[in-house]
Image: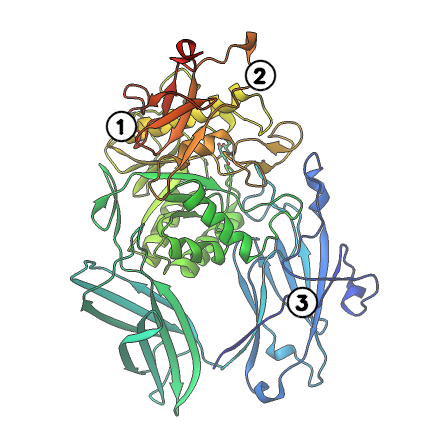
Amino acid sequence: MRNRQPINNGWLYKPHFTEEDLLSSHGFDAVRLPHTNIELPYNGFDEKSYQFISCYKNSFQIDKELSHKEIVFVFERVMNHSKVYINGQYVTEHFGGYTPFEVNATPYLNSSDDNTIAVVVDSTERNDTPPFGFVVDYLTYGGIYREVYMEYRSPVIIENVKIATPEVSAQHSTYEIDIFTSAPLDSSYLIKAEILLEDEPIYTHTLPCDETTLFSVNDGFHNTKLWSLDDPALYQLRVQLIQNDEILDEFSTNFGFRTVDFRNDGFYLNGELVKLRGLNRHQSFPYVGYAIPKSAQIKDAELLKYDLGLNCVRCSHYPQSKFFLNHCDAIGLLVFEELPGWQHIGDEVWQENALISIEEMIRRDWNHPSIIIWGVRINESKDSDAFYSKANALAHKLDSSRQTGGVRNFAGSKVFEDVYTYNDFVHRGDNIALEAPQKIAKRKMPYLVTEHNGHMFPVKKFDVEKRRVDQAIRHAKVLDTMYETAEISGAIGWCMFDYNTHKDFGSGDKICYHGVMDMFRIPKYASAVYASQSDLKPFMEVLSSMQIGDFEASELGHVMVFTNADFIKVYKNNHLLGTFYPSTDLLKHLPHPPVIIHDLIADLLELV
Ligand code: GAL
């Protein structure tokens, strides 16, 4: 059986590299993964400070009992370009910091106990790899910023497994399993595929082998538990490769029974219309850049679903952690996942690398029920027919069960995708909140707003109250228009939290204050707009400190309360001022319009 061991401890690190470093450990420091190549200040730092070549090394012993197996290292993510050496010999390189890669160490091993793996990590902005080549409004950081595993594998393995669910209903659902092996298998092998629910096998298929590398099962069953937002039932698929009664390899994945469909009149989950209410998420954190562990990935998904009351997230602008996606599956949070890139399209080599990253993303993530659409266009890039016809054909060939989108920022673009996904920054506070879909797409087709607000109104957590309230109102107006307009499937705002950025963007201190939370995920008032639209738990936030010293001429004006309650009662010094209800004219298309309190004195005058 495949034996997988985490290799996150015992690494040596040096923030430089020369050939001698492959042979000597002089000047290296002990580190653990996930690791950032440099600890960064909170703000105001030079983006060049993490752009250098560094070296990581680790020594490993081979378990004698498993020495007949292949030894493969799995790197979850290294930013940006990696060259891997085993025992001083060059083995392979990998381009791009947003997809995993594997290194087969077997031919390079010493017979002795002491083997060394070294990774030379180039964290500069190399022009051969997306998103680089022009400017980028976020930082990409550096280092081996995710986990590494060492695997003992049989010479033949199950490389990947894909499960699609073409027909879905509580009464009867069908599934199609594709199993990919690393080599053709003769009749001495057997493949066993089991469907499990809560760890109990419920269906088992045994497949004879016949000299191919692709094995398929089509079947179905009655009484299916559907994957939904409120009850995201997860099934497991476990596939085993067996020879002479020995399990040579096993591949397990979660999956769900659900249908997803963007139509001209909105997005449907399991045949029911769902308005997508989401935010964009970068994967960064202060000081450590991208090097955040599993617990922090899980926490972000929880914040989006439970604290912000969202049903959708866009992984802007690259595939994100498997821990994040697994948790989106587990809690019922819909995901827009896209390839790495930002506005710029490079030369042929660059485009080839971009297509490779689409393939790596889809093959890695095709079983996640939470993923509802593949973003296969470089975020906000211009039209490029040859490149984007290839990108869409590739995505459709790999996964015919999901539609494609491609995020653009202009109207009337040439469309190879199934959904017109548009960053709509029209709103300036006193004008329309969103453009009409027909005006932008120039045709009738499914339509989704993938960004709004953001740079149109940067707000710091410590800005004066009025500005923080205005940010909230702007987000609310966009949501209101989204709910009002049937053709708009949803709106995914910019963005979940503030982030460090390049000198060309941000507020002079290298921070884009575009979040509804700050960089530490502390909510601003705009968070309350989102949280109050969900019915998962009671929520109320008064968007005012009511400290008159904070207002011009000490005039407090009206106070907005974002809540999912039917009404609220307001007291002053234990005297009931009144009962207040959600607005019936302003923002009235929201599931929960805000309560607006115009009179904070009310009957008090008579009482005192
Ligand atoms: C968009 C871009 C985002 C971010 C945002 C700021 O144009 O896609 O990555 O820069 O603007 O509002």
Percent across and percent down for residue 582 are 32, 25
Q: How is the image coloured?
A: rainbow
State the residue lying farthest toward the top: 553
Q: Helix, strand or loop at disc 1?
A: helix
Percent across and percent down for residue 6 are 59, 70
Q: Helix, strand or loop at disc 3?
A: loop
Mark 1 CB near ligand 1 (8 Å cut)? no
> Which of label 3 and label 2 is nearer to you?
2
Say which amino acid is labelled 3. Asn
Q: In the rendered view, does 512 fall on the left or right side of 1?
A: right
Q: In the rendered view, does 435 fall on the left or right side of 26?
A: left
Residue 491 visible to an observer of this rendering: yes
State the residue lying farthest toward the right: 26
Q: Kindly report the distance in space between the C-alpha atoms of the residues bearing marks 3 and 1.
A: 53 Å
Residue 339 visible to an observer of this rendering: no
Percent across and percent down for residue 158 are 42, 75
N-terminal-most mark, 3 or 2: 3
- Location of residue 568 by image quarter: top left
N-terminal-most mark, 1 or 2: 1
| Residue picked out by circle 1 | 484
Percent across and percent down for residue 518 are 56, 36
Say which amino acid is labelled 1. Glu
**Where is 187 relative to 331, above or below?**
below
N-terminal-most mark, 3 or 1: 3
Q: Kindly report the distance in space between the C-alpha atoms of the residues bearing marks 1 and 2.
A: 35 Å
| Residue picked out by circle 2 | 550
